[in-house]
Amino acid sequence: MSNTGNPYGNPYGSQMTAQAQFGGAAPAPKAASGSLIKDTTTQGFAKDVLEESRNQPVLVDFWAPWCGPCRQLTPVIEKVINEAGGKVKLVKMNIDDHPAVAGQLGIQSIPAVVAFIDGRPADGFMGALPESQVRAFVDKLAGPDAGGDQAAEIEAVLEEAKGLFDQGEFDGAAQLYAAVMQADAENPKAVAGIADCMLALNQHERVRQIVDGLPEELRAAPEIVTIVKKLEQIEEARKLGDPVALEHVLSLNPDDHEARFKLAKIRNVEGKRDEAADHLLLIMKKDRTFDDDGARRQLVELFDVWGPKDPATIQARRKLSAVLFS
C-alpha cells in the first residue's frame, strides 16, 4: 500500500531497511495500489466496474476535488482496500468530470461509495466514515478471511520484534516494526514499538514529535497512551534533580519521603524498575499519608506503563499486597 504519508519516516537514518515480508513478497506500494485502485471515466465504467465486479466486489468512490470529506475518506478507504489483498477493488470517479453515472444512480451528495457485485449495485455508504466502519463494510463484502493471512503474518513479526526489543536489540526490533508499518502505517503496536526503540536510544524529542503528529484516533490506542505516559515520566524525571544527590539526602535522612519519591521516579525512567518499586513501597510502609497515599498511586501508574506481565509488575504487586493486607 502507499506509504508516502507515513509521518514516522526513517527515524534511524538511511541504514534502516525493512526485513519482514508479507504474503511471500516485500510490500510494493506503487504496484499494489495500481492493481487494486484505479480511476475511471464514463466510457470505462462498464469495463472497470460492471465487468470487473463479476470477479470480485468493486467499490466505486464518487468524489470531487473541492470536497473536503472526500479527501478525508481517500486515505482510509485506500488503506483498507490494499489490506484486503485483492478480494475487493476500488474504482474512483470524479463527478465533476464524469457526472452521468452518479446522476443515473441518484447520488446527490459526496463522498458516496457504492459496492457492485456481479454487475449490479449491492450496497454502499455516504460520508467520510471512520476507518473501523469502512473496514467492517469491506470485510462484509470480502468475507471474514479478508486480509487474514497478512494479519497473522503481521502479528508474528510484531512478536519477533518484541522479542528482539526485550533482548536489547533495538535496531533489529525497529527494522521489523518499520516493516509492519509499510503494510499498515497506523498499526498501533508497530507505532508504539518504534517509539519504544527510540526511547531506549534516548531519542525522546523525536518521539514527542511523532506522538504529537498522530491522528486523534490512533493516539487513543492503549499502546500509544502508554507511550505518552512514558514520555511524561521521562520529561518529569529530568526536572527532579541529581539521583546521586538524592541518594546522599536519603543516607542522611532515610525518612525524607520527598527525596525518595523523586528518586523512585528517576530510577523508573532509568529502567531500574525493581528499585523504583522498592522505594515507593518503603514510603508506603512508613507513611501512607504522604502525598495523600501518593506512593501507592504512583506505583499503580507504573504498573500501567510496565504492563501486567512484566516481571517487575508481578513482583511489586506481591509486595504491595503484603503491605496493604499485613
Image (cartoon, grey):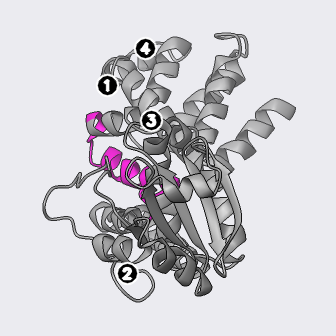
Q: Nearer the viewer, mark 4 or mark 2?
A: 2
Is the residue marked by circle 1 packed among few (<14), some (14-19), or many (20+) residues within 10 Å?
few
Q: Which mark is residue 21?
A: 2
Q: Nearer the viewer, mark 1 or mark 4?
A: 1
Write down the quadrant of residue 240 in the picture.
top left
Magenta region, main secondary structure: helix
Q: Which residues are magenta?
A: 184-205
Which of the two residues, 156 or 259, is positioned nearer the viewer here? 156
Residue 91: x and y in percent read 47, 66
The alpha-carbon separation of the residues under discs 1 and 4 comes to 13 Å
Q: Identify the residue at image location x=67%, y=24%.
A: 297
Residue 281 vs residue 68: left or right? right
Q: On the image, numbered disc 3 is attached to which residue? A: 68
Mark toward the start of the polypeptide (3 vs 2): 2
Element under disc 4: helix
Q: Identify the residue at image location x=41%, y=71%.
A: 43
Q: On the image, numbered disc 4 is attached to which residue? A: 252
Is the residue marked by circle 3 packed among few (<14), some (14-19), or many (20+) residues within 10 Å?
few
Mark toward the start of the polypeptide (4 vs 2): 2
Location of the C terminus by quadrant is top right
The alpha-carbon separation of the residues under discs 3 and 2 comes to 35 Å
Which of the two residues, 124 or 314, is positioned nearer the viewer here? 124
Residue 83: x and y in percent read 51, 70
The alpha-carbon separation of the residues under discs 3 and 1 comes to 56 Å
Q: On the image, numbered disc 1 is attached to which residue? A: 244
Element under disc 2: loop
Q: Nearer the viewer, mark 2 or mark 1?
A: 2
